[in-house]
């Protein structure tokens, strides 16, 4: 008897088991991926806060607004505001994610990704500068390192 004749009666009963095993493996893989993307050490999305800050008509209103709360910022006392400048300091609470080496690079990448019309004109290990153009104005956004994992974001116009 050939191998095909011996195995062919078994195939109909094996297919459901193989399909079940493949489905279980897919579910396990998706669960692992979901758990890895929801790590508590990762910063929240910063684009909404950056857009709110850049679009503000008067920066003095921002410290009291939750929409301007930057991820990792303890409270509004860490920010100073005047009519034409918004300056915040905070300690980065996340670690390098394997793609971005340090919090300043990650913040710079976020700034570049958040705005459709942005020019990144300074990129050093301790300072990154951007010019964001909106419909109403040009805004300077500077991210810099103040100390070990301590960041500063200064937005001016």
Image (spheres, rainbow, N blue to C red):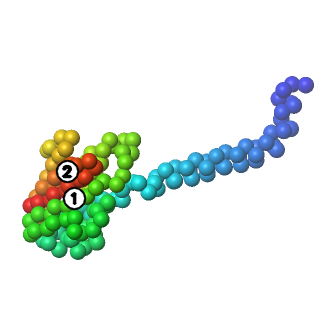
What x and y, as percent, mark residue 71? 31, 61
**Which residue is rendered at x = 32% and y = 60% of the image?**
72
Tell me residue 146's x, y (percent): 20, 50
Q: Position of residue 67 (x, y in %)?
A: 28, 70
At 9% from the left edge and 69% from the top edge, which residue is drawn?
83
The answer to whether marks 1 and 2 mark residues whose Cβ atoms lie closer than 8 Å is yes
Residue 79, position in %: x, y?
Answer: 19, 65
Q: Is residue 72 among what the camera can see?
A: yes
Is 21 on the left or on the right of 33, as rendered? Answer: right
Q: What residue is at 84 percent from the left and 38 percent from the top?
A: 10
Total labels: the figure holds: 2
Quadrant of image for the N terminus = top right
Please, which residue is most extreme toward the right here?
1
The residue closer to the viewer here, 21 or 38, is 38
Q: Is 115 left, or right, of 139 in this rendering? A: right
Q: Quadrant of the C terminus?
A: bottom left
SS for tag 1?
strand
Q: Which residue is mark 1?
A: 89
Q: Which residue is mark 2?
A: 146
The image's mark for residue 138 is none
Residue 78 position by quadrant: bottom left
**Left or right: 14, with 82 as reference point:** right
Q: CA distance from mark 1 to mark 2?
A: 8 Å
Residue 124 or residue 116, whichever sits in front = 124
Q: In what element is the residue under mark 2?
A: strand
The residue sitting at the front extreme is: 148
Task: Assess disc 2: are there few (<14), some (14-19) or many (≥20) residues with their C-alpha within 10 Å of its C-alpha.
Answer: some
Picture quarter containing residue 55?
bottom left
Give the mark, 1 or 2, whose residue is nearer the N terminus. Answer: 1
Q: How many other residues sit within 10 Å of disc 1, few (<14), some (14-19) or many (≥20)?
A: many
Task: Tell me where residue 132 sits by quadrant.
Answer: bottom left
Is residue 117 visible in this depiction of the protein? no
């Amino acid at each position: 008897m050939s191998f095909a004749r011996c195995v062919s009666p078994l195939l109909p009963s094996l297919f459901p088991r193989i399909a079940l095993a493949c489905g279980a493996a897919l579910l396990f893989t998706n669960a692992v991926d979901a758990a890895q993307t929801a790590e508590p050490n990762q910063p929240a999305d910063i684009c909404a806060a950056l857009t709110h800050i850049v679009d503000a008509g008067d920066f003095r209103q921002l410290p009291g607004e939750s929409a301007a709360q930057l991820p990792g910022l303890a409270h509004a006392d860490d920010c100073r505001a005047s009519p034409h400048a918004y300056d915040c300091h905070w300690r980065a609470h996340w670690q390098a994610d394997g793609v971005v080496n340090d919090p300043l690079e990650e913040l710079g990448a976020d700034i570049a990704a958040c705005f459709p019309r942005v020019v990144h004109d300074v990129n050093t290990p301790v300072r990154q500068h951007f010019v964001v153009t909106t419909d109403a104005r040009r805004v300077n956004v500077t991210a810099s390192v103040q100390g070990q994992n301590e960041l500063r974001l200064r937005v001016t116009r």
